[in-house]
């Protein structure tokens, strides 16, 4: 993908992000149409995730290639980054729409249990 095409895509994504944020927080404060609000919030979340994924994956790829890494290494790290973004996006959606207030405690407990298991002798 050319740099100019990438810049246009990122500008459009950022513009739609700003427009959606404006609509959610300032244009619809008195209208509590719940399906419309949920759709706008979900679309904003997906646009933000896409913009962050594309920007950081480009940084990862160029950093690996400038450090004389191979294309396979860059692809592997970008794949890991994609998994992390999808996992965090899934957690945010579950927490936002299903009111999972204790999701941090659950992840912390699992992480502590996993760390304890891996460090035992």
Image (cartoon, grey):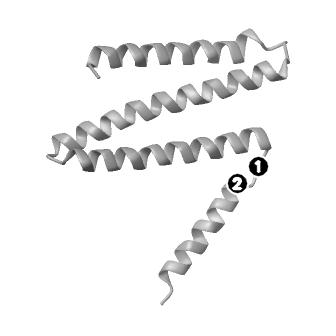
Q: Nearer the viewer, residue 104 or 9?
A: 9
Q: Nearer the viewer, residue 31 or 43?
A: 43
Q: Position of residue 99 (x, y in %)?
A: 79, 44
Q: Residue at x 84, y 13 (%)?
A: 31
Q: Position of residue 60 (x, y in %)?
A: 31, 41
- Using the numbered discs, state the Cα–Cα distance from disc 2 to disc 1 in whole angstroms: 6 Å
Local secondary structure at mark 1: loop
* In this rendering, position of residue 23 left or right of residue 72: right
Residue 120: which disc?
Answer: none
Q: What residue sits 67% from the left and 55% below the top?
A: 104
In terms of secondary structure, where does tag 2 sit? helix
Bin the neighbour count of mark 1 within 10 Å (Cα to Cα): few under 14, some 14-19, many 20 and up.
Answer: some
Most extreme residue toward the left is 68
Circles 2, 1 touching at the beta carbon (< 8 Å)? yes
- Point 42% across, 45% down: residue: 81
Q: Which residue is mark 2?
A: 103
* Residue underneath mark 1: 100
Coordinates of residue 56 in the picture (x, y in percent): 38, 36
Q: Is residue 56 above or below residue 84?
A: above
Farthest-out residue, top: 27
């Amino acid at each position: 993908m050319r740099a100019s095409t990438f810049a246009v895509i990122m500008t459009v994504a950022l513009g739609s992000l700003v427009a959606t944020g404006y609509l959610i927080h300032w244009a619809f404060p008195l209208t509590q149409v719940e399906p419309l609000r949920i759709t706008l919030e979900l679309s904003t979340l997906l646009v933000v995730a896409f913009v962050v994924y594309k920007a950081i994956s480009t940084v990862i790829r160029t950093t690996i290639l400038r450090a004389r890494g191979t294309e396979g290494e860059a692809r592997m790290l970008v794949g890991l980054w994609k998994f992390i973004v999808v996992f965090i996006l899934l957690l945010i959606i579950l927490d936002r729409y299903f009111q999972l207030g204790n999701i941090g405690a659950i992840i912390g407990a699992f992480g502590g249990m996993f760390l304890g298991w891996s460090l035992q002798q």
